[in-house]
């Protein structure tokens, strides 16, 4: 290659390199604030997500506790109903006997006699 041609080619390459470096520097100056703002927003989103995740976990635990308490109340109520039925069977049988029993005459006297008989008076 000719020496006279080499110097302008090198100068052009050097100018292109400086132009590229200057373009990168200008682009970095333009986009850096936008990138910083986006990074700040991303950090805020991550913090909000973590907060919501914690709240959802707490809510799930509270719902689980409520379900367990409801099941315990239901079991207690079923047990109480069973005990009440067992306690009232004798009274129910006596009431059924009283209803089936035929009496004659005055109803007040008949009901008094039946009640006195049941109460062993």
Image (spheres, rainbow, N blue to C red):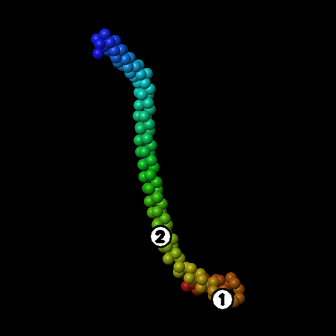
- The answer to whether residue 116 of the structure is visible from this angle is no
Q: Residue at x 41, y 27 (%)?
A: 36
Q: Residue at x 53, y 76 (%)?
A: 88
Residue 79: numbered disc: 2
Q: CA distance from mark 1 to mark 2?
A: 37 Å
38 or 29: nearer the viewer = 29
Residue 20 left/right relative to 99: left
Q: Could you tell me residue 81's position as x and y percent?
A: 51, 71
Residue 65: numbered disc: none
Residue at the outermost front position: 1
Q: In which quadrant of the rendered image does the N terminus lie?
A: top left
Reading the image, the residue beneath label 1 is: 102
- Density class for disc 1 (Cα within 10 Å; few <14, some 14-19, many ≥20) is few
- Density class for disc 2 (Cα within 10 Å; few <14, some 14-19, many ≥20) is few
Q: Residue at x 36, y 14 (%)?
A: 12
Q: Could you tell me residue 101's position as x and y percent?
A: 63, 87
Give the mark nearer the N terminus: 1 vs 2. Answer: 2
């Amino acid at each position: 290659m000719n020496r006279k041609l080499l110097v302008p080619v090198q100068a052009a390459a050097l100018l292109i390199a400086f132009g590229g470096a200057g373009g990168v520097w200008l682009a970095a100056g333009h986009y850096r604030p936008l990138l910083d703002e986006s990074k700040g927003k991303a950090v805020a989103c991550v913090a909000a997500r973590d907060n919501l995740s914690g709240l959802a976990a707490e809510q799930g635990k509270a719902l689980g506790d409520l379900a367990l308490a409801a099941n315990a109340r239901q079991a207690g109520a079923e047990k109480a109903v069973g005990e009440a039925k067992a306690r009232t069977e004798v009274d129910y049988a006596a009431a059924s006997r009283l209803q089936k029993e035929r009496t004659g005459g005055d109803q007040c006297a008949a009901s008094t006699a039946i009640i006195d008989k049941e109460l062993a008076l």
